[in-house]
Image: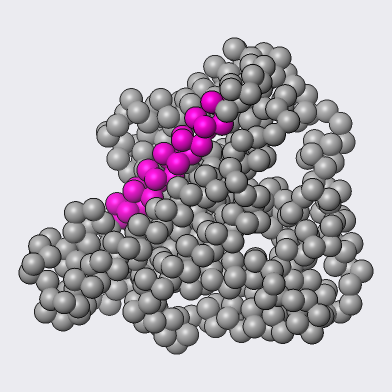
Amino acid sequence: MSPLQSAREVARFRGLKIGPAPRCCLDSHSRIAYWRHIAAAGVLCAAIVSAPALTIWNPSVRTNAYIAMLQCFVVFTMLPELSREVRSALDGSLAFRVIVIGFLICTTGWLAQGISVGDIDRTLFYAIQPMFVLAAKAWFYRTDSNNLHRIYYFKLWATVGAIAYLFIMLWLAAVPDLDWRQAKWLPIYRNIRHLDYDLAIVALLGTACWMARPLKRQHLNWGLFVLLGYVSVWSAGRGQILTFICFLVVYVALIRSRQMRWTLLRPSAAFMLGSALFCMLNPEMALWILGRSSTGSVDEISSGRVTIWIRALETVLAANWQGIVLGLGPDAFMRHAIAPGLVQPHNVIVQIVLEFGLFGLAIVGLLVVDLAKRCRQMLVDSNASVLVTGAVSALLALLFYSMIDGVFYHASPFLASMLLIAFILSRDQRTEARARS
């Protein structure tokens, strides 16, 4: 049995769908691959579950650092597959070559400005992402699409557990009506907006998984989305709700089956039911949310985001030419104290310009265009599955979300976004392999 055949056999085993053949029938190389894939799956699940839990003891900056360490472990575990992925990407992907060279150029520019990038935790967080995406792509490629379902379930139970912990601790602290606005501190997430990130991920992945298996767990899915709608309004998650609406619109546009479009009404209706239920039970808070979203200046409606963006861009323009072109380095927003008490500008474009400069913004734009072409080709030419279409729609919705909040800064939504990219790339690779065979 060749190593490739062995890997495919390993790739179908029960928990990860990695070989119908029992382990006793595999050679030593296959058994090692088997356990490496198990270890990678375990670390991925640990990262997903621990991302919200770590916020109980750590601020978001330290949480990001811990998740980056777990990502490094996944990269190390998948090293044999990763080496092949890197060679393939260097040979066949202009976008990958550009991002590697571009990061080195930006790093050189930061050092030339006297920025001690080695002392900044976020440097590792950024540096590990290309390798992590390729490692996760290799892991997804050697498994079936059910593993996206499993990742979703881990994310679901991690979020449900975090919400339960939040409500219990607010109740023990005697917060009136469990109203987060009357709490001096949050026992988990630290900021209610960080809960919204996880609510968004669960809603997007949950919808995709429900669509892929429309007849399974109907009652649980309905209950889940009623709960999501209720908690989303309770947390005043305007950005998260807009993101879910954006996701539904994109999903409807990409789905080819009329029957599936009708099926999409189920999560939408359940979410709306939960939202309406909260508004009926808590009319005063519903009116407060409505007033907050419709009165005052644009800056007031956006919770001061416009002012934050202007200050961040002014900081870049006030720097030397190196800062404008190559950025001010990782965590520049916090290091320059642009908005004391905040660690990121709540806008991915502003964050990229601030940290990587105009050069970095051009590189990220190239990556987005390359990924968009791959997604379009896969959706048009291969009659992509409902789950793959949902993953593409979720990624586009998260890109929209990142324009108004810190989705691509905080560890939990950033990790989910990288896993979605890896899953999409793995399905694209499978499509190319089928076309060649």
Image quarter for residue 103? bottom right
Q: Is residue 166 magenta?
A: yes
- Coloration of the structure image: one colour
Q: Nearer the viewer, residue 242 or 249?
A: 242
Q: Nearer the viewer, residue 246 or 194?
A: 194
Give percent across and percent down for residue 145: 31, 55
Q: Quadrant of the N terminus?
A: bottom left
Position of residue 373 relative to residue 216, above or below, is below
Q: Residue at x 39, y 45 (%)?
A: 154
Identified at 79% across, 48% down, the residue is 341
Q: Relative to 253, is 30 above or below?
A: below
Q: Which residues are magenta?
A: 145-168
Q: Residue at x 65, y 40 (%)?
A: 190
Residue at image point 72% right, 84% down:
108
* Image quadrant assignment for residue 329: bottom right
- Residue at the far left: name it: 25
Q: Is residue 323 left or right of residue 102?
A: right
